[in-house]
């Protein structure tokens, strides 16, 4: 089984970028074998469509946001589900994998308890910390917390650009579907024209046959009067001969 993490390599949203980085860092820390799939890469349109169709949507009429997690083709959840699993040390159940026990617990104990001092990790822990970095002033007050979300125009603009990317993708798919429908309609029209031409040819051939048959019948009808006329002439000639014979016979008497 392969864990597949669907990410967006061109996302303009800082929040999405941070989520993707955090997710991959945690998977590396847990020594999970996974395959990152950048759905914005050319040639991966089918993978992008698969993710969109099979992922959770948090808001109506919105596209699922990366990262999205799958175990092969089985959906595991989105980043919020993943992050919740991290908090309760249930990453392996979330990914539908068998836990590696002590190593898993050790990893998360060290990752979650790692503290930074002036940007350096505590000695004895060689793993990269995923704990949000904080900057403090001389009085110990936090002046910057990297775990805080970047509010403002920057992230909003990034989300707008992401929405625009998906809108363009949908537009391309709709255009492709329209082109396919137009091509099918064109082919259907060509078939109909061919059928009409064939029907016309058959009809024309039929008319020609009918005309030819009618002409033959007319010829036959024309021949019949000639035969009848010949018979009448023969009968009249026989009557005349008979009358002539009778006449001369009477003369002899």
Image (cartoon, rainbow, N blue to C red):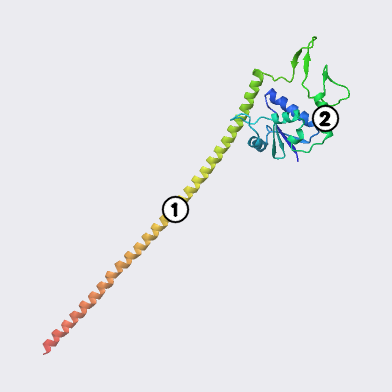
Residue drawn at (59%, 35%) of the image: 173
Q: Quick one: SS at disc 2?
A: helix
Q: Nearer the viewer, residue 106 or 158?
A: 106
Q: Identify the secondary structure beneath mark 1.
A: helix
Q: Measured along the vertical axis of the image, is residue 36 above or below residue 206?
A: above
- Name the image quarter holding residue 247: bottom left
What residue is disc 2 on?
107
Q: Quadrant of residue 237?
A: bottom left
Q: Residues within 10 Å of mark 2 (few under 14, many from 20)?
A: some
The image shows residue 195, relative to residue 167, as above or below, that is: below
* Mark 1 lies on residue: 199
* Residue 104: numbered disc: none
Residue at x 72%, y 24% (from the top left corner): 18
Residue 75: image quadrant is top right
Q: How many marks?
A: 2
Left/right of residue 252 with respect to residue 107 in the rendered view: left
């Amino acid at each position: 089984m392969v864990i597949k993490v669907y990410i967006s390599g061109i996302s303009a949203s800082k929040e999405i970028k941070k989520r993707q980085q955090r997710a991959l860092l945690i998977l590396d820390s847990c020594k999970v074998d996974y395959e990152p799939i950048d759905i914005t890469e050319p040639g991966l349109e089918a993978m992008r469509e698969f993710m969109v169709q099979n992922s959770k949507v948090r808001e109506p009429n919105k596209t699922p946001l990366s990262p999205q997690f799958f175990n092969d083709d089985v959906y595991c959840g989105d980043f919020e589900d993943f992050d919740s699993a991290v908090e309760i040390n249930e990453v392996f159940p979330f990914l539908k994998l068998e836990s590696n026990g002590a190593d898993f617990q050790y990893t998360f104990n060290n990752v979650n308890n790692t503290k930074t001092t002036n940007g350096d990790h505590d000695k004895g822990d060689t793993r990269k910390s995923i704990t949000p970095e904080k900057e403090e002033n001389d009085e110990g007050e936090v002046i910057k917390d990297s775990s805080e979300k970047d509010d403002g125009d920057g992230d909003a603009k990034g989300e707008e650009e992401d929405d625009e990317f998906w809108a363009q993708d949908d537009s391309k798919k709709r255009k492709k579907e329209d082109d396919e429908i137009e091509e099918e309609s064109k082919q259907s029209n060509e078939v109909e024209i061919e059928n009409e031409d064939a029907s016309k040819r058959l009809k024309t051939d039929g008319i020609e046959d009918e005309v030819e048959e009618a002409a033959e019948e007319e010829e036959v009808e024309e021949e019949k009067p000639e035969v009848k006329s010949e018979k009448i002439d023969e009968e009249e000639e026989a009557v005349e001969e008979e009358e002539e014979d009778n006449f001369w016979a009477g003369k002899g008497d």
